[in-house]
Image (spheres, grey):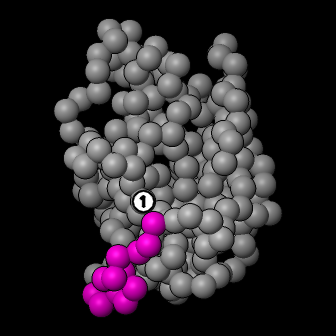
Amino acid sequence: MPLMPRAAAGGSRVATCHFEHQNWRDGVAPPPDKAMANVKVDVAERHSYVFESDDKIKRRWAYRAGMALCAILGRFYNFSIMGIHNVPRRGPAVIYGMHTTHNIDVPIFLAQGCRDTSRVVRALLHKTSYMFGHVTKLFGGVVGSRDVAVRLLQEGHLVGVIPGGLEETFHHMSGLGSRAYEVHWDSFWSGKPRAGVAAVAIAGGPGVKVLPCFVDGGEEMRWNPFFDAWTLLRLPPPPGGAGGG
């Protein structure tokens, strides 16, 4: 998918999320592991809350309050979604995108996406982020393991993931901003590109839609003194990192 050109910097808080539909079944995709073809672990028992219906999740007062706050942030950043019609109103789908250096775009997107489609995205979180699981689970967040993702798709849910993880974040910080919108899915540990999104989509069964998205102007939405100092000092990516897939 050709990425949209980055938005011109200059302080204007404008961000747009672009959707496209992708079908890996007709192209080249890595085959799923044999173990993923039949998910043996009953993940529904370990993460029962995330398998609840969209209506039940949306009725929670915490969910409604959080989405209202994110809607206010969306107006502040003039955030909009293009191509929302590509998101199915029912049935399984995987939404994936790039990891920004702030992730403010994620909850804003979740709020607007729910408003426009009436669907709750089950966000796959890295295990280090899931230390706040008692909070994130109220909004459909769940630890991002493959068995959980496959089971969610098999039950017809909408799954969201940012495969690049922390490695992609530091990649965006390098090069004095010139790499801010480059896709970087290489695992620090193996050195190979992550293929979890494709494997999960295939293992999810027939009918799983794959929806890449891109936030145009996403890196202009934040100011982080730590990340800016790292960039100005031209420091290399840290040894190690965190990411899913």
Specify the farthest residue to the left.
239
Q: Is residue 149 left or right of residue 28?
A: left
Residues 26 and 54: in front is 26
| Whole-percent x, y for residue 193 in the image | 39, 50
Q: Is residue 106 left or right of residue 46?
A: right
Quarter of the image for residue 32 reads: bottom left
Residues 179 and 129: in front is 179
Report the residue at 73% width, 75% height from top: 89
Q: Can residue 160 be found in the magenta stretch?
A: no
Residues 171 and 140: in front is 171
Instruction: Decide: is 93 above or below 181.
Output: below
Q: Can residue 36 be found in the magenta stretch?
A: yes
Q: Is residue 147 left or right of residue 181?
A: left
Going by the numbered disc 1, the residue's amino acid type is Ala
Quarter of the image with the C terminus in it: bottom left
Write down the region rendered in magenta: 30-43
